[in-house]
Image: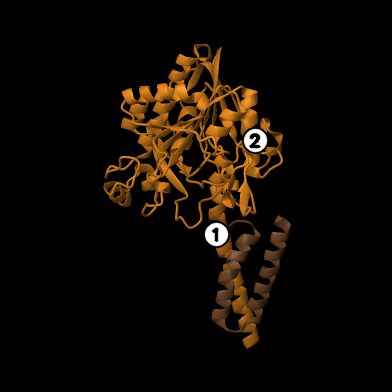
Chain colours: A orange, B brown
């Protein structure tokens, strides 16, 4: 009798285990679902990165590429967001562009989720929310808050020491950091293949100017910055002057020649494109933050950062108002616009004309929601 | 590499289930279940 009772208890516990596994697994796997993006009618074509590098097909590294082409020929611009999926301003800026713009001259290529795999999980032990929501004119849209790195389920194991394709020695986890894997490896790990696919896109789309959208923690020195390759020195200086006239403070950061594997270095070294990386201040992925919540992602308010600012430990102005997502996106939009107009000044024959690009001031005043397509 | 990993986890899962049915003390069974949840999620590469 005792034996039967014990076996019955074991069976019930095993059943309970399966239920818990199913529920938690279901929630975890829901992170793999992509949010819809609603391109404008001006979209010329939507491709996958695998159409530039076939090996990526049916892998988690494959990602959407949105192309807007004007009737007149001009310059070819690449805007990349989502290289680090825990830096939402880059991703949201790319989505805002996809959902608003039309090209009248030249070609605009937009990759919103450069590291698609990084969107499918969250950083362990960070307590990060899975999603944050933005209110649009007719309903709320939710977006994934992902991880800086490729999902270890999709790329495993990490080496102890990672020597990236450009020869830089890094810690093993960086083998899953897209912005350390350029110019990529044709037969490498998944993240290196994604980097290789993006380099192939540069060649096939004949990209002239490339902008990589990022965010960094307020205590990190390279912040509110335009990081430029030496081929974009003049361009970055001109854009900075224009931004300062608009009231945006940016710093200019030269891409170090001995820091290899990053977009602003390898794009410039390995392609004909002028390479720029933009950084804004994101409290939600800093080390000094308190509780990470959707509100921190959206409003950027954190009392620890206010205290750190008072102690002079931050590299950006930070007060009780925080640094909201709408301001970070507005900064990215203003910088993209200034870089484009400066590029036109330097290379009039490669002019790119974009219609209906949300203005940075409007985004700063009205927020992001009014410029997003309502959910279906 | 992934197959080797899965086989190791499957072996451990098998052991845990066997232990669960062999063990008589209730709280020891509960402890086994807590470990089993992690291993099953690993086995299906969920987390």
x%, y% of residue A205? 62, 23
Q: Which quarter of the rendering shows the N terminus of chain A?
A: bottom right
Location of residue A121 with respect to B42 vertically, above or below: above
Tell me the residue at 37%/31% (across/down). A250
Residue topped by disc 1: A23
Tell me the residue at 47%/15% (across/down). A346
Q: Is residue A137 visible?
A: no
x%, y% of residue A22? 58, 60
Q: Which of the 4 quarters of the picture holds residue A28? A: bottom right
CA gap between label 2 and label 1 equals 37 Å
- Count of all numbered marks drawn on residues in the image: 2
Crowd tier of the residue under label 2, counting other residues whose Cα lies within 10 Å: few below 14, some 14–19, many 20 or above: many
Instruction: Determine whether the residue tagged by mark 1 lies in a helix, strand or loop.
Output: helix
Q: Which of the 4 quarters of the picture holds residue A167? A: top right
Q: Is residue A97 visible?
A: yes
Q: Residue furthest front?
A: A258
x%, y% of residue A367? 35, 34
Between label 2 and label 1, give the one nearer the viewer: 2
Residue topped by disc 2: A196
Crowd tier of the residue under label 1, counting other residues whose Cα lies within 10 Å: few below 14, some 14–19, many 20 or above: few
Q: Chain of mark 1?
A: A
Instruction: Determine whether the residue tagged by mark 2 lies in a helix, strand or loop.
Output: helix
2 and 1 marks on the same chain: yes
């Amino acid at each position: 009798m005792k034996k039967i009772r014990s076996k019955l208890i074991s069976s019930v516990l095993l059943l309970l285990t399966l239920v818990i596994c199913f529920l938690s697994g279901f929630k975890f796997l829901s992170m793999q679902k992509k949010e819809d993006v609603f391109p404008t009618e001006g979209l010329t074509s939507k491709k996958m990165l695998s159409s530039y590098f076939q090996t990526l097909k049916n892998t988690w590294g494959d990602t959407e590429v949105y192309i807007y082409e004007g009737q007149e020929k001009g310059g070819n611009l690449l805007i990349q967001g989502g290289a680090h999926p825990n830096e939402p301003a880059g991703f949201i800026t790319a989505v805002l562009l996809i959902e608003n713009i039309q090209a009248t001259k030249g070609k605009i290529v937009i990759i919103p989720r450069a590291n698609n795999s990084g969107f499918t999980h969250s950083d362990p032990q960070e307590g990060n929310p899975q999603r944050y929501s933005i209110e649009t004119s007719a309903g709320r849209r939710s977006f994934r808050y992902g991880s800086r790195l490729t999902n270890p389920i999709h790329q495993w194991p990490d080496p102890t020491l990672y020597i990236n394709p450009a020869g830089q020695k890094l810690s093993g986890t960086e083998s899953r950091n897209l912005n350390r894997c350029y110019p990529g490896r044709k037969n490498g790990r998944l993240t290196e293949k994604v980097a290789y696919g993006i380099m192939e896109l540069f060649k096939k789309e004949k990209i002239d100017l490339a902008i990589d959208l990022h965010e960094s923690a307020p205590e990190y020195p390279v912040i509110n910055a335009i990081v430029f390759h030496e081929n974009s020195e003049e361009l970055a200086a001109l854009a900075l002057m224009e931004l300062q006239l608009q009231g945006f403070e940016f710093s200019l950061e030269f891409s170090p020649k001995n820091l290899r594997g990053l977009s602003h270095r390898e794009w410039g070294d390995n392609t004909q494109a002028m390479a720029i990386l933009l950084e804004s201040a994101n409290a939600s992925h800093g080390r000094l933050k308190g509780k990470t919540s959707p509100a921190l992602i959206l409003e950027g308010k954190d009392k620890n950062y206010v205290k750190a600012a008072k102690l002079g430990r931050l590299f950006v102005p930070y007060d009780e108002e925080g640094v909201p997502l709408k301001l970070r996106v507005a900064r990215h939009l203003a910088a993209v616009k200034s870089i484009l107009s400066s590029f036109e000044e330097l290379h009039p024959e490669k002019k790119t004309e974009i219609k209906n690009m949300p203005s940075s001031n409007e985004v700063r005043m009205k927020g992001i929601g009014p410029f997003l397509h309502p959910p279906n | 590499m992934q197959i080797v990993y899965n086989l190791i986890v499957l072996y451990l899962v098998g052991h845990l289930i066997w232990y669960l049915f062999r063990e008589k003390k209730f709280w020891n069974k509960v402890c086994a279940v807590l470990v089993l949840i992690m291993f099953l999620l690993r086995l299906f590469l969920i987390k």
